[in-house]
Image (spheres, rainbow, N blue to C red):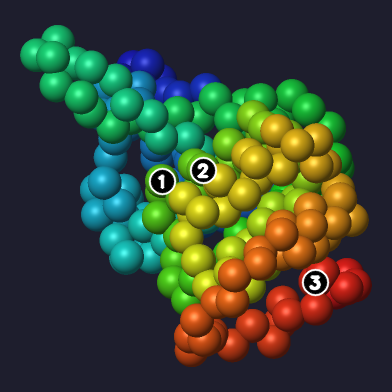
Amino acid sequence: MESLLLNQINVPEKLLECYTSLGMDEVDLAIILQIQKSLRHENLFPTPDELSTKLTISGTECGMALRKLIQKGLLAMSQQQNESGQITEVYSLEPLWEKLISNPKKVEEEESVDGAIFLLFEQEFGRPLSPFEIDMMNSWLDEDKIDPALIKAGLRESVLMSKLSFKYIDRILREWKQKGVHTVDQARQASKSFRSRQNSPTVSKPKRDTSFYYNWLEEED
């Protein structure tokens, strides 16, 4: 009995009250609690298979859920150096605790908009995003404070230029920022100006189907 009482983790009441407002379901909540327990026992980066042994889902399903939690900005991955000088991956729940402190209703609205951007990227790339790509998108949204509509415009521009890659989109967004481009209308004008300066004819190349994005320079979807 004493051992049972001593081996506990602290769960904020607000997490139990507001987890659905953060876009989480019961599986997500269970994963968060299992990660919190693992961190308490100094297992700083439990694998999906390790976590799934304590859950009712498979390791693959757990991996997908972890990726979604990172996308939503509720779970973070970082690197740290251990005593042997080795670089290891670690999980952090700090983003979740920070969101709990903020207004849950506002967070829910932000997550809805941000989630749509992540889904749009996955649809265009035709695959799930990697942790590195998720971190890059979160950096655009949280650190650089780039409007989701402008990120969408950067994606469209990369499609139109047949250069679909995160590196190219990041270059577009940073160039727009340097030029003071902060809205979709300003991005349209910048792109039109760029194209008007291209005097040499381009070689005709097979193009991807850009029907979803083709008219972004003319009007908003």
User: What's the residue at 74%, 24% (across, down)?
Assistant: 101
Query: Element type at marker 3?
Result: loop
Could you give the CA–CA distance between mark 1 and mark 3, rounded to whole angstroms? 27 Å
Residue 104 location (% of width, % of height): 80, 38
Residue 20 location (% of width, % of height): 71, 51
| Image-based side of 85 in relation to 134, left or right | left
Q: In the rendered structure, which amino acid carries the disc numbered 1?
A: Phe
Which of the two labelled residues, at mark 3 and mark 2, occupies the earlier sequence position?
Answer: 2
How crowded pointer 1 is (Cα within 10 Å; few <14, some 14-19, many 20+) is rated as: few
How crowded pointer 3 is (Cα within 10 Å; few <14, some 14-19, many 20+) is rated as: some
Question: Which callout, 1 or 3, points to the residue nearer the camera?
Answer: 3
Residue tagged 3: 216
Residue tagged 2: 136
- The answer to whether marks 1 and 2 mark residues whose Cβ atoms lie closer than 8 Å is yes
User: What's the residue at 63%, 39% (across, down)?
Assistant: 174
User: What's the residue at 83%, 32% (across, down)?
Assistant: 103
Q: Is residue 114 visible?
A: yes
Quadrant of the rendering where the C terminus is positioned: bottom right
Residue tagged 1: 132
How crowded pointer 2 is (Cα within 10 Å; few <14, some 14-19, many 20+) is rated as: some
198 relative to 82, above or below: below
User: What's the residue at 80%, 42% (across, down)?
Assistant: 181
Q: Residue furthest front?
A: 200
Looking at the picture, tell me which residue is in the foreground, 212 or 105: 212
Question: Which callout, 3 or 2, points to the residue nearer the camera?
Answer: 3
